[in-house]
Amino acid sequence: MTVPVMFRGPDLEHLYHMPHMWLKDLAGNVPGFSLEGFLASPPRDHHILQVYIGSSGETGIDFSYSPLYRLRLGGSIEPDSTSFQEVKSGSLRGEWDIFSTYISRLWLGPEYTFGVGDDGAGLRAFAELTLGRKEMYLSWHLRPELLRFSHSLGVKLTPSLSLQLKDFSRLGFGYRF
């Protein structure tokens, strides 16, 4: 990859005759410039905790834990809204980031769901799209006998806190740390 050199000054006068240069050579030709750490991956992704409440009182909690970059483990539970002592439904999952851009990510991995007539293992695809303070999440849950789709829309209130609308029926907060 070549890049135009659009800097001026006495430290770069020796490069003025060059119309372009290889990006990998830039660090060696400019004193004090280093690419060290520029292409390095972060040690992990954000952990995420989401809490929802619906119009008829049903609640939900979703947690994602990232031990490594591009890997997340997580689960969700929906307690019984009458007693809060029993779990109505839930899921456990593992996800790998298989495609990333500056504004989007696509995660894919196995998921096991349990609850009222919804037990079974399957595949989950999860897409994230972030445009400034606006966020959109889409997820697909695929099993041989079932295809389920869910979506969330969100607005970032702070860099780590967002207000979210899940499936147009639940309002909640998401916290990234």
Image (cartoon, rainbow, N blue to C red):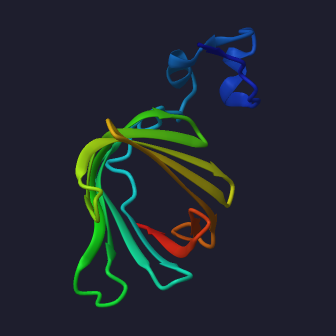
Q: Nearer the viewer, residue 39 or 86?
A: 86
* Vertical order, 113 against 8 (above or below): below
Quadrant in the rendering for residue 108:
top left
Q: Does residue 143 appear left or right of residue 26 in this picture?
A: left
Residue 146, image x, y percentages: 38, 43
Farthest bottom residue in view: 83
Q: Quadrant of the N terminus?
A: top right
Q: Residue at x 48, y 85 (%)?
A: 57
Query: Camera-side residue: 70 or 18?
Result: 70
Work out whether residue 55 or residue 134 is closer to the camera in this orientation and state it: 55
Q: Would residue 141 be visible to someone looking at this image?
A: no
User: Which of the image's four quarters has the C terminus?
Assistant: bottom left
How many numbered callouts? 0
In percent of width and height, residue 132 lies at 69, 55
**Which x, y percent locates residue 80?**
32, 81
Is residue 172 in sight in this rendering? yes
- The correct choice, above or below, for 123 with respect to 87 in the image is above
